[in-house]
Image (cartoon, rainbow, N blue to C red):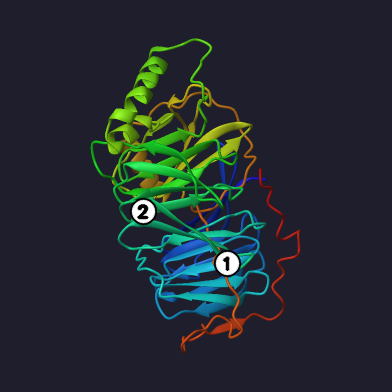
């Protein structure tokens, strides 16, 4: 498989495939709909969902290889996010969530009066065998509601943070959920469906930041987090030995044991900070303050970090899976903009010299817009409408929605 990337632009949208570190292929470009702010591709298939600022309440579903529209839906308010896997398509508005069956686009369930969610924060497991959906359970504290979209039932409520949520994402298997609050100082990882806290990572203590993106590696051994600062943090999810023994006792291990022994005498907040793990690896971006999306991909059996920025650049970094530390920039690609603009940008910037690198074949497909998630569910006899709520109007294109054609919609492999 390969890594797929979807980018909305002022003139339309573009779909890319990353076949190697050095090669970024634009496999499709559409200029029919301007000002696209949501574009989601179903893995490496031909199905793509598009929402434009000119019609923010309307979702269009296309078969981009055939150049045909499959269907479109209109909603009662602006669409803030769309998430999809091979079972469900989820549309998130500020105070409601709509769940569709992706095989025929039928509306299965409408969740009304959800807590105010102005950023459209939600996550859907890409593993369609469980199709877990997560979304905020409160607009004042960091509660997470986890739904099972396949069994159509609420699974659990996780009291994740004291402050409102800023980012959530599932691991590829759907068995782990990571979250961050608006403060951005602590990132937590929970087991799914139990909702037990597995890990707690401290991004920093000096300042609050806006974490914009969380993403697990395909094997869920690493978790990356990007924000409005110049640093991307990568955490390693490893369980420490219960006995605390090491082959070669180190100073840090000794200090760790002292902290553990002292924690019973300290306030909970202080002892909790001591037990939190810091970043395993970091990346210093060449820009700060710009919104970006980060993702971890396995390329030629080695982990790589990809960062796409709102100014139209894609950065690819090497990660040392053993020792971590500062990651090395190996390639930079342009996602949109003219050649002249790109040349001027390159002249005005001092780029870190990339290390010599081979051509790496991407071996894992990841969500096109970073940690993506969500599958809400629940059938109702009236198609999901309650209390006179208007069911979205829709029009189907001629012919069925061919999602069972594995030539056009190849299966995705889950580690």
Pointer 2: residues within 10 angstroms few (<14), some, or many (20+)? many
Percent coordinates x, y for residue 120 in the rendering: 41, 64
Question: How far across and down, in percent of the image, does residue 368 sit?
Answer: 53, 53
Of 304 and 86, the residue lying toward us:
86
Which mark lies nearer to you, 2 or 1? 1
* Mark 1 secondary-structure assignment: strand
Left or right side of 160 for 127: right
Res 12 seen here: no
Q: Residue furthest top?
A: 248
Q: Is residue 319 left or right of residue 70?
A: left
Q: CA distance from mark 2 to mark 1?
A: 25 Å
Check disc 2 and report its element: helix, strand or loop.
Answer: strand
Residue at the spot x=43%, y=29% of the render? 281
Residue 178: percent from the left, percent from the top? 46, 47
| 310 shown above or below 403 | above
The C terminus - image quarter: top right
Quick one: quadrant of the N terminus? top right
Q: Residue at x 61, y 74 (%)?
A: 69
Q: Which residue is mark 1?
A: 153
Numbered mark located on residue 166 in the image: 2
Q: For this rendering, which residue is in front, 234 or 406?
A: 234
State the residue in front, 8 or 154: 154
Tally of numbered tags: 2
Q: Which residue is most to the bottom?
A: 388
Q: Please say if 54 is above or below 47.
A: below
Question: Along the polypeptide, which appears first: circle 2 or circle 1?
Answer: 1
The residue at the point 76 percent across, 59 percent down is 406
| Image location of residue 326, percent across then percent down | 41, 26
Residue 140 in view, yes or no: yes
């Amino acid at each position: 498989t390969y890594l797929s990337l979807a980018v909305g632009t002022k003139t339309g949208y573009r779909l890319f495939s990353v076949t190697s570190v050095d090669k970024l292929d634009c496999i499709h470009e559409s200029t029919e709909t301007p000002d696209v702010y949501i574009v989601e591709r179903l893995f490496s298939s031909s199905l793509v969902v598009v929402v434009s600022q000119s019609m923010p309440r309307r979702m269009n579903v296309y078969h981009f290889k055939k150049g045909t529209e499959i269907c479109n839906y209109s909603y009662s308010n602006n669409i803030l996010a769309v998430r999809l896997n091979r079972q469900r398509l989820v549309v998130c508005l500020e105070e409601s969530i709509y769940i569709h069956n992706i095989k025929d686009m039928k509306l299965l369930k409408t969740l009304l009066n959800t807590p105010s969610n102005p950023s459209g924060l939600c996550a859907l497991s890409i593993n369609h065998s469980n199709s877990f959906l997560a979304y905020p359970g409160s607009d004042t504290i960091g509660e997470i509601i986890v739904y099972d979209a396949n069994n159509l039932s609420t699974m659990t409520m996780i009291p994740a943070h004291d402050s409102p949520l800023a980012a959530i994402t599932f691991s590829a298997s759907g068995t782990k959920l990571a979250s961050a609050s608006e403060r951005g100082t602590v990132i937590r990882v929970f087991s799914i469906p139990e909702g037990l806290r597995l890990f707690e990572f401290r991004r920093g203590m000096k300042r609050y930041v806006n974490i914009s993106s969380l993403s697990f590696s395909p094997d869920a051994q690493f978790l990356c987090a990007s924000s409005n600062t110049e640093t991307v943090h990568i955490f390693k999810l490893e369980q420490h030995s219960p006995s605390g023994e090491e082959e070669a006792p180190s100073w840090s291990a000794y200090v760790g044991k002292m902290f553990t022994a002292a924690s019973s005498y300290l306030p909970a907040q202080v002892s909790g900070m001591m037990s939190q793990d810091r970043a395993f690896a970091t990346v210093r971006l060449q820009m700060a303050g710009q919104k970006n999306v980060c993702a971890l991909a396995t390329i030629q059996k080695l982990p790589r970090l990809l960062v796409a920025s709102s100014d139209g650049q894609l950065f690819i970094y090497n990660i040392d899976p053993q020792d971590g530390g500062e990651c090395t920039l190996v390639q930079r690609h342009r996602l949109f903009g003219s050649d002249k603009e790109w040349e001027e940008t390159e002249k005005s910037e001092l780029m870190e010299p990339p290390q010599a690198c081979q051509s790496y074949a991407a071996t894992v497909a990841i969500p096109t817009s970073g940690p993506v998630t969500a599958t809400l569910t629940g059938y109702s006899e009236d198609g999901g409408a309650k209390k006179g709520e208007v069911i979205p109007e829709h029009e189907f294109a001629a012919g069925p929605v061919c999602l069972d054609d594995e030539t056009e919609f190849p299966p995705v492999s889950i580690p």
